[in-house]
């Protein structure tokens, strides 16, 4: 971070109570800055029933803000989260798809609803994401068919770029944000490895230095994701059928509790089994037997509605990922029109599921172009 560039900026920090966003406050404070901190409340109303960690989170956030002399304000985005992100999630699972609520939370809440309520008063919104940005002046290095709404002379583009920590990199969770949201985003710890962030927190005696990272959906705390779905979608018994033979091997409690490629936690006898296909209309799960069945893999798959973060579309040679893992896969991208593509991966990919976001990067998996949703295939 360049101190001179930030000195005259009004900076808001999204302070969650975790170690990452707390080190963000330290990083800005050591530059002589005193950003305003905001804790976004998105948890459910029935916090006791959901065993939510919001109270502990707020205590940690309050302690960190006080340590660095920063003002802390709680911003309630509960209704926006449940009206937008929860609706997105439940609509997708009912349709037999595999949604990613955290991706939409970044777009709709952290850089969306918060911006509408308070973020619009600030030049930059700083978060504890493991991601980086860089700027580029666009002349004519991109073919016209790869530029969307871009001026071709001296336009400064801001890119979302990966973190040096491949395990913690969170660009995949940010790949649906808009260009204007990226323009306001600041990632002060994005150049660090996670171990380095922990070391800073220990050295600075932050109250949450040894606090475990949160797991799963951003607000759920300790509650199981399946319980979250059950509350809003319910249960409906259906058949589990072996794909290759058509043999019924058991019963499930609703196709929305399962995802393509899933093996663990199925509870079907005579396994191991992999979920390989869903018949949503008839509520049937199709499975294949074995530890590594061929039907659990795909090499070519379609995506639609590709969202370019900054208006530059990817070229033919790309890297990509379909879930939050350290690995990137090489592929060629075949355009089929109207923001749709077929991804031709050089590797066989396990558990490709409709509804997942395919996040697209350059060949060096450094710059993130954006993401598109994997569509239903036969």
Image (tube, rainbow, N blue to C red):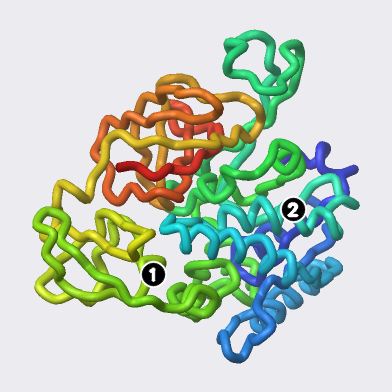
Residue that badge 2 annotates: 112
* Residue 324 in view of the camera: yes
Give the vertical position of 110 relative to 310 (above or below).
below
Numbered disc in front, either 2 or 1: 1
Q: Is residue 99 left or right of residue 328?
A: right
In terms of secondary structure, where does tag 2 sit?
helix
Residue at 46% of width from left, 58% of height from top? 95
In terms of secondary structure, where does tag 1 sit?
helix
User: What's the mark number on residue 257?
Assistant: 1
Q: Which of 86 and 239 is in front in this view?
A: 239
Q: Earlier in the sequence, mark 2 or mark 1?
A: 2
Q: In this view, does 201 lie to the left or right of 226?
A: right
Give the quarter of the image for residue 271. Answer: bottom left
* Residue 34 in view of the camera: no
Q: In which quarter of the image is the N terminus?
A: top right
Residue at 54% of width from left, 29% of height from top? 339
């Amino acid at each position: 971070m360049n101190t001179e560039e930030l000195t005259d900026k009004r900076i808001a920090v999204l302070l969650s109570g975790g170690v990452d966003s707390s080190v963000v406050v330290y990083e800005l404070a050591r530059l002589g800055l005193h950003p305003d901190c905001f804790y976004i409340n998105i948890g459910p109303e029935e916090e006791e029933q959901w065993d939510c960690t919001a109270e502990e989170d707020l205590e940690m956030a309050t302690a960190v803000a006080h340590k660095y002399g920063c003002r802390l304000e709680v911003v309630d985005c509960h209704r926006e989260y449940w009206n937008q992100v929860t609706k997105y999630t439940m609509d997708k699972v009912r349709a037999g798809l595999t949604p990613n609520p955290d991706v939409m939370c970044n777009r709709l809440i952290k850089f969306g609803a918060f911006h509408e309520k308070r973020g619009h008063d600030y030049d930059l919104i700083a978060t504890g994401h493991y991601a980086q940005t860089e700027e580029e002046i666009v002349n004519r290095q991109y073919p016209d068919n790869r530029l969307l709404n871009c001026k071709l002379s001296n336009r400064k583009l801001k890119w979302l770029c990966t973190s040096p920590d491949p395990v913690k990199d969170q660009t995949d969770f940010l790949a649906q944000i808009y260009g204007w949201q990226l323009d306001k985003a600041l990632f002060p710890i994005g150049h660090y490895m996670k171990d380095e962030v922990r070391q800073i927190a220990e050295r600075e005696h932050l109250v949450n230095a040894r606090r475990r990272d949160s797991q799963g959906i951003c607000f759920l705390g300790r509650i199981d994701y399946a319980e979250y779905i059950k509350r809003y979608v319910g249960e409906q018994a259906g058949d589990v059928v072996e794909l290759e033979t058509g043999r019924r091997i058991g019963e499930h409690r609703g196709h929305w509790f399962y995802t393509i490629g899933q093996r663990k936690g199925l509870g079907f006898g005579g396994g191991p089994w992999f979920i390989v296909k869903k018949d949503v209309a008839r509520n049937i799960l199709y499975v294949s037997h074995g530890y590594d069945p061929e039907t659990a893999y795909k090499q070519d798959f379609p995506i639609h509605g590709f969202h370019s973060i900054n208006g530059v579309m990817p070229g033919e040679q790309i890297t990509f990922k379909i879930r939050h893992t350290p690995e990137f896969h090489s592929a060629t991208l075949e355009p089929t029109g109207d923001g749709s593509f077929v991804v031709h991966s050089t590797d066989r990919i396990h558990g490709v599921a409709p509804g997942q976001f395919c996040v697209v990067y350059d060949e060096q998996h450094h710059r993130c172009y954006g993401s598109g949703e994997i569509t239903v295939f036969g």
